[in-house]
Amino acid sequence: MSSLADVNTAMRERVTHLERRYGRKRVYLVSGIVVILVVLSAIRVITSRQKAAPPPAPRSVTVSKVITKDVPLYLDEIGTCTAAETVQVQAQISGQILSRDFEDGADVKKGDVLFRIDPRPFDAALASAQADAALAHATFERQKELRTKAVVAGQDYDVAMANAMKADAAVKSAQVNLDYCTIRSPIDGRTNIRNVDVGNLVAPSSPPLVTVQRLDPIYTDFTVAEPDIPLVRQHLNGAPLQVLTEVENDNHPPRIGELTFIDNAVQPGAGTVRARATTENHDHALWAAQFVHVRLILETLKNAMLVPSSAVQIGQNGPYVFVVKSDSTLDLRQVKPGQRQEGEMTVITQGVTPGESVVTRGQLQLAPGMKVAAQEDKISPAGGAREAATAQ
């Protein structure tokens, strides 16, 4: 308290000194001027703060037009390729392999020689059977002549005829066994690696000598999920459905095939239905047991509306897009998206009209009614390999 009183006393003494030196009127005049200047400065600062900020510049966004195009309605699945035919070539007789007439992995035609088994035992068996047949026929001819003269009993004639027939059957059997010495490909296809070499003894009970698979055409096996079965069933009564088969990280375009089989029951525990497509494979680009991407084309949507997939945003009320109106202001539209298509495009079934501009980039902090500076997206949407294959 004493210090505050001292300050007040000093101030009064200072004022009294100034009044004596310059006069009371002059001191009050100067003080008033200072007070006025301070007040004016405060008013100026407050006024400058209360001035309205200039409107922000329009936000720059990238836009793209809503286009119309024919696109497929499809189901994407994972499948495997299966050879159209698979034959395990086995020996029909016992013997020693004399030669191998193919290379592992070679393409062979039906009837091409694969192996040869030592034929000598079977040649001898055939010669013996032919000799027995000749004797049996000679005996039968004598019995036939004697019967015409009523010299021989009918039973002897019947026995001679039966022996001749048995001898003929033995010759045929020996000839079949001799033919089995030459093992031929039963189908057109490609061989795998052989299981036996020249010099090995083989028999009908031995493991397969080699496997031949027909790879052209080739099957694509896949499954359809149970919830998609009603949609697939709606399209089964028309033309055969197209199926695209594509190998991941492959330079070959997707192969177009046809749906040729769909099972009549759901697999227990899996909730799926087996399906199969048949696809041409002239260049053998698809291999048996290879995993592939499968697209089942159900129908073609005519003049479907498409926007870049980046234009579709998800909000509290569902999917939406920002539409740039003619006055460069924004309109928020709730939309109903369809399937995503190749070329990063999405089908829109409801909410926009063809030719409208939708924002594709720069949606952050946008709001309806906001003015924007729109720039056309320079990246034009283009269909992918699957879409091109479908259009062929």
Image (tube, grey):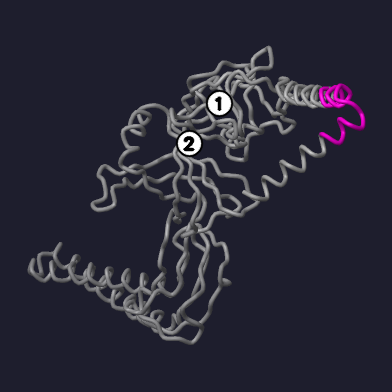
Left or right: 149 with respect to 40?
Answer: left
The residue wearing badge 1 is 321
Quadrant of image for the C terminus: top right
Magenta extent: 16-32
Name the kind of residue labelled 1 in the image: Val
Above or below residue 170? Residue 325 is: above
Q: Main secondary structure of the magenta part?
A: helix
Residue 104 placement (x, y as % from top left): 56, 72
Q: Are marks 1 and 2 in contact (CB under 8 Å)?
A: no
Above or below residue 196? Residue 299 is: above
Residue toward you, 243 or 35? 35
Q: CA distance from mark 1 to mark 2?
A: 33 Å
Q: Is residue 210 visible in the rendered structure shown here?
A: yes
Left or right: 281 with respect to 324?
Answer: left
Residue sitting at x 45%, y 79%: 117
Left or right: 250 with respect to 134?
Answer: right
The stretch drawn in magenta includes residue 318: no
Residue toward you, 97 or 328? 328
The quarter holding residue 40 reads top right
Q: Is residue 373 visible in the rendered structure shown here?
A: no
Residue sitting at x 62%, y 17%: 356
Q: Which mark is residue 242?
A: 2
Residue 67 placement (x, y as % from top left): 62, 22
Residue 146 placement (x, y as % from top left): 16, 68
Above or below residue 210? Residue 7 is: above
Residue sitting at x 50%, y 82%: 197
Residue 355 placement (x, y as % from top left): 64, 16
